[in-house]
Image: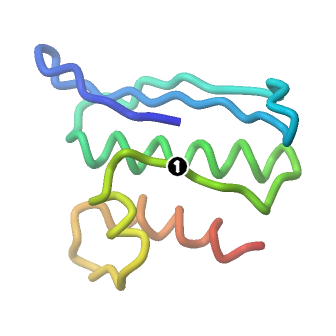
Amino acid sequence: MDGGLNPIMGSIVDGGVIKDHKKNLLGGFALNKGMGSVIEARLWGILEELKLDWKTGFKMVVVESDSQNAILLLNKKTHLNHQLFSIIQACKALIEDK
């Protein structure tokens, strides 16, 4: 999964795929999330990937991201006033629902 920012338009997009242990493609997604930041795009990508995994029945997954900041946000306590609090908490809720 990955998320990105169109620097000209300022819009964020994310997409991802789910594969089984034999690397067979099981599903995927591509979404336009409107205006936002790069970190927001990465977090939306993680959230959508987790939702797809859970919907497909996979709860033991490896989530890879090239965004160290996104991973750090998911691994530390988030303050209620953080601008991305709702996305971060939604990801954490799925991660904790094993």
Q: In the rendered view, would you say 67 is above or below 60?
A: above
Q: Residue furthest left?
A: 8
Disc tally is: 1
Q: Residue at x 77, y 73 (%)?
A: 98
- Nearest the camera: 10 or 67? 67
Q: In the rendered view, would you say 42 is above or below 75?
A: above
Q: Which quarter of the picture shows residue 6?
A: top left
Q: Residue furthest front?
A: 22
Q: Identify which amino acid the numbered label 1 is placed on.
A: Glu
Relative to 6, 31 lies left or right = right
Q: Residue at x 77, y 27 (%)?
A: 27
Label 1 CA crowd tier, 10 Å (few <14, some 14–19, many 20+): few
Q: In the rendered view, would you say 70 is above or below 10?
A: below
Residue at the disc numbered 1: 64
Q: Secondary structure at mark 1?
A: loop
Protein image colouring: rainbow
Q: Position of residue 60 (x, y in %)?
A: 78, 62
Relative to 42, 61 lies left or right = right
Q: Position of residue 77 (x, y in %)?
A: 35, 85
Q: Position of residue 30 (x, y in %)?
A: 54, 22
Q: Residue at x 80, y 31 (%)?
A: 23
- Nearest the camera: 22 or 53? 22
Relative to 91, 44 lies left or right = left
Q: Residue at x 48, y 41 (%)?
A: 45
